[in-house]
Amino acid sequence: MPSLCYGAGFHAFCRCPRAVALWQAMAEHWRIPAAATFHRTGSEWLAQTLCDLPDTERMELMMTLWHCWHVRNEIKHHKQPPPVEASKRYLLSYVDSLIGVQNNPGADPVKGKQVVMW
């Protein structure tokens, strides 16, 4: 069975028109490399790319890839994939929430409450 990042996974992450559209939309907000810069050079292409990125860009790229895989699963299971604009809004909001929780672990993002320091 081919590696997730080498065979069909490479297409789902980097060559699928829906994935490329999502990458382009996210690149308007995040400093992620363009999908076209990746080449199927072996099973380690993704690991090498992630190692070379600063922490924030690594997280943003991983979130983009994670959502590309979600879209792939929707299509694979005969569901309607989300529009690129909805995916973009979702990812921006989700990452914002994650960073908020990381920066303020006492906050309750569901209720919008947090401890106020005087």
Image (spheres, rainbow, N blue to C red):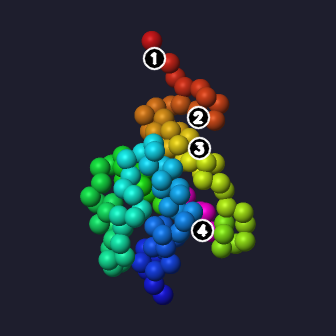
| Crowdedness near tag 4: few (<14), some (14–19) or many (≥20) residues, C-alpha within 10 Å | many
Is tag 2's residue or tag 4's residue first in the polypeptide sequence?
4
State how far apart marks 3 and 2 are (Cα).
17 Å
Question: Magenta residues: mostly which secondary structure?
Answer: helix
Q: Could you tell whether 21 is left or right of 77 in the image?
A: left
Q: Is residue 11 visible?
A: yes
What residue would you read off at disc 1?
Answer: 117
Q: Is 27 in front, or is 106? A: 27
State how far apart marks 3 and 1 are (Cα).
31 Å
State how far apart marks 1 and 2 are (Cα).
17 Å
State how far apart marks 4 and 3 are (Cα).
18 Å
- Residue type, label 3: Arg
Q: Is 8 in front, or is 4? A: 8
Q: Which element carries disc 4, helix, strand or loop?
A: helix
* Extreme-top residue of the structure: 118
- Residue type, label 2: Pro
What residue would you read off at disc 3?
Answer: 89
Comparing marks 2 and 4, which lies closer to the viewer? 4
Is tag 3's residue or tag 1's residue first in the polypeptide sequence?
3
Label 4–label 3 contact, CB within 8 A: no
Q: Which residues are magenta?
A: 67-73
What residue would you read off at disc 2?
Answer: 109
Task: Identify the residue at horizontal 63%, vertical 48% (top origin).
Answer: 86
What residue would you read off at disc 4?
Answer: 72
